[in-house]
Amino acid sequence: MDRLLAVCEKKYTPEKVELIKKAAEFARAAHEGQKRESGEPYYTHPEAVATSLAKMDMDAATVAAGLLHDVVEDGDGITVEKINELFGEDIARMVDGVTKLTKTGHSSDMQTREDRQAENLRKMYLAMANDVRVVIIKLADRLHNMRTLGNCSVEKRQRIARETLNVYAPLADRFGMGAIKAELEDLSFEYLYPEEWRHLCSLIEPQQEERMRLLNSAIKTIVESLDKAGIKCEISGRRKHMYSIFRKLKKNNKSLNEIYDLVAIRVIVSTVNDCYAALGVIHSLWKPMPGRFKDYISMPKTNMYRSLHTTLFSDLGMPFEVQIRTQEMHRTAEYGVAAHWLYKEGRARPDELDSKLAWVRDLVNYDTDADSTREFIDNIQKDFFSDYVYVLTPNGEIIDLPAGSTPIDFAYRIHTNVGNHIQHVKVNGALVKLDHKLKTHDVVEIITSQQASPGRDWLNYAKTSQAKSKIRQWFKKANREENIVRGREMLTEAAKRQGKKLADLVKPEFCAPLLKRFTLNDMDDVYAAIGYGGMTTGQALHRLMEEYRKAEKQAELEEKLLHKEELRESYDEQGRGVVVKGEHDMVVHFAKCCTPVPGDEIFGYITRGRGVSIHRKDCPNAEQLLLDVERIIPVEWVSGMSQTFPVTIHVIANERAGIMMEITQLLLSMRVNTKYLNAKSGGNTVDITITFDIQNAEQLQNIIRSIMKLDSVIKVDRANQT
């Protein structure tokens, strides 16, 4: 705890430090006796998470929530209500949020690992929209887990590292948390691609000593030159992180000598003016490489990153990069949105942080518009975690869009009404088509007209899910009757291609699941949705065909069962011994496919014109019958019955003289009325089929156990007739 408190005492008021101490003591007690896979006390994990959060400049409540983030999941009887009582609603809400992200919940056997991961990602992205701090705690949690991943099995290391590289590192990048993103990527890289990691290390190490000599010499020169110019600075050198090098080599098919920022110098100055003054001094010392200067101060990245980057030729000809920024820019570059939290209340513009996180609030709309969890995840990854272009409005405002975006995406990002009324588009002063791909630094001007409206081809031109959703909304509101006609025609054609008539597919019982899934009132809503592009014919037809085929299969099964039972005296016409719960005078019949007897677990199935058929729950046809839940009815045995019921068993025994006589005599001794007996020889064994009358399942089990005790008997099974 000493290390955590040493960090906290420098950042928080004494009152806030006491809150963190209280949370630390509570967490230590809650995790008493628990161990990590390394054998260390479990408490070392939440303490490390909280220390990372404090170093990021998160508020004290988030640090306390970091200490408590596992107590509900792993503590004995600790609830969110208890956390609320002891630490307040804000901390309890964050702990609850992290707990829900950690729990996988109940999932069906049919759900794949990919489905479960998609649902967990959905929960995380929606939690971001509610409180970004929940996901920042999760990032700190993942960072410490990655640092200690070596204690886990190889399979677990690979799985966690892959998820970290695909999900958590991009998330850290989007939040501007550069230091965490780089460490997560490098740790994942080492576990996922150990051979590539070792090979890259072997390429870099031989010249690393020379690079560091160059770096130290350049640092000394820059310090002396900036001091002469009256610019105070802090300077450090660093090596580019490994995964970034690996990705550049792979993506651009370059050699290591073509990577110009293997080493970099970071210059931290006091003001923005000093940044540009320092750049001038440094450019006077070495020749800058053409096309390698980037001004992220005047044009920040979408994750709030600000800095000047320039690549220079050293005296030895080896290139190196220099990054110039202020202390505040550096803190933001390291920890992104997290670095702003501690100072949020005291900012001159208190809405600045919220404006930087405006995109997070859009996540809820993405969930509403998506037809499935996977579509939601795909849309989020594409619109918020892909490569970006940075374009400008005529007033110089920077708009970030996914690479490949068009003027339609730009217009809808500005405002829905701007998008709905595009007439012409100018890029860098020249008219362009709506499918024009925008590039970084393009200046985009949208010319609107109230008479203009979206065309259906816009859905093909738009790149972002946001723009496509707003186009569909426009079509949804405009010309509903036209959309209904168009949608019905499209679905009719799609049904024809499947060899079906639409009228056969749109029966009420087939439509109900479709309407429920998309929260629609009737099939006109479905036709309208297809007409304006809110639903595809494939989505609608798939669900209708699924219900149609299910009904076909059910009808075939029922007809098959009825036919069999009619051919073989399949029912006891009196149906004695069973009553239907909640019904009087209901005709019941015992199904011959499973010949239920008192004591068996049973269910009733409502047949067409034949009353209720009684089946055992382990009947070979039960799985199919139980799918039709509306025709299943509860039934129960009547107690104190005296009548008998037919049942058939199969006996397999080693063939020997007298075995048939022994079985017959045994049944006689047990006062069993044998109705049918047959034996078939099969090599060294004999298969004996016996039908007899019994009163209940207990009597049947006694008979089976007695036969099993006979010499040479191998197996006795109750027969089913499928």
Image: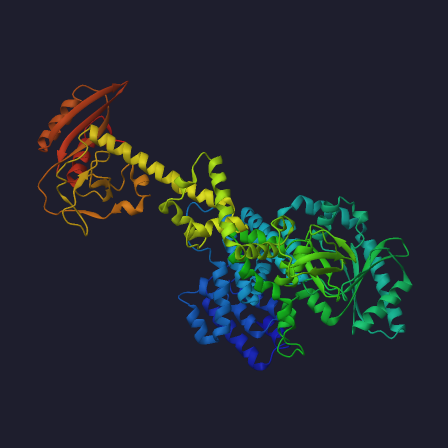
Left/right of residue 384 with respect to residue 71 in the rendered view: right
Q: State which quadrant residue 557 falls in.
A: top left
Is there any visible trace of residue 458 in the rendered image? yes
Q: Which residue shows up at 59% across the image and 71% down it?
A: 4
Q: Nearer the viewer, residue 294 or 589?
A: 589
Instruction: State whether residue 456 is above or below residue 705.
Output: below
Which color scheme did the rendering employ for the protein? rainbow
Instruction: State whether residue 137 is above or below residue 526.
Output: below
Left/right of residue 519 with respect to residue 648 in the rendered view: right
- Report the number of discs: 0
Q: Position of residue 131 (x, y in %)?
A: 54, 67
Q: Position of residue 19 (x, y in %)?
A: 53, 77
Q: Position of residue 182 (x, y in %)?
A: 67, 57
| Quarter containing the C terminus | top left
Q: Which residue shows up at 81% across the image and 71% down it?
A: 233
Q: Position of residue 629 (x, y in %)?
A: 31, 46
Q: Nearer the viewer, residue 526 or 397?
A: 526
Left/right of residue 591 with respect to residue 237 in the rendered view: left
Instruction: State whether residue 702 is above or below residue 300.
Output: above
Q: Nearer the viewer, residue 544 or 384?
A: 544
Left/right of residue 184 with respect to residue 316 in the rendered view: left
Instruction: State whether residue 573 is above or below residue 523.
Output: above
| Quarter containing the N terminus | bottom right
Q: Nearer the viewer, residue 568 or 62?
A: 568
Is there any visible trace of residue 40 in the rendered image? no
